[in-house]
Image (tube, helix red, strand yellow):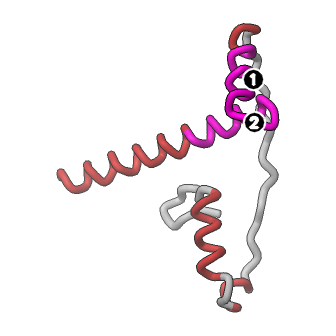
Amino acid sequence: MKKRNGRRLTEEEIDRRVEAQADDGSAWTAPVRVRRARTLRVLLSGPLAARIGFLAKLHKAKNPAVWVQTVIEDRLQFEESALGDLKQALKTSS
C-alpha cells in the first residue's frame, strides 16, 4: 500500500488505518494488492554470525534470522523517521 506521495506504508501505519476503518463497511469495498516479500540472503563472516547468535539469544529471539529482521526493521523505521524530520525541517527553514 502506498501513500499519495508514493512512499510505502509501514506495517504500523497499515495497522492504524485498518483499525480506524474496521467499523466502516465502505472502507472494505476496494481490494488491496499484497505482494510476497522477496527473500534476501546475506553472507556473514563466522565471527559476525556468532555475535548475532549471541545477541539473538540475549534478546530471547526465536532464532537469529528473526532477530536480524527485527533489528533491520527497527533501523529502517528510525531512518525513515529521521528523513521525514529532515524534510520537514528543510520545508520550514525555506
Q: Residue at x 53, y 46 (%)?
A: 77
Quarter assignment of residue 62:
top right
Which labelled disc corresponds to residue 61? 2
At numbered mark 2, what does the secondary structure look like: helix, strand or loop? loop
Q: What amino acid is at disc 1?
A: Val
Q: Nearer the viewer, residue 68 or 88?
A: 68
At numbered mark 1, what does the secondary structure look like: helix, strand or loop? loop
- The secondary structure that most of the magenta stretch takes on is helix
Q: Position of residue 89 (x, y in %)?
A: 26, 50
Q: Residue at x 72, y 81 (%)?
A: 30
Q: Position of residue 55 (x, y in %)?
A: 68, 24
Quarter assignment of residue 39:
top right
| Residue count near mark 1 (Cα–Cα under 10 Å), binned few <14, some 14–19, many ≥20 | few
Name the residue beneath numbered marker 1. Answer: 42
Q: Nearer the viewer, residue 71 or 6?
A: 71
Whether residue 35 is in magenta: the answer is no
Q: Which stretch is magenta?
A: 49-74
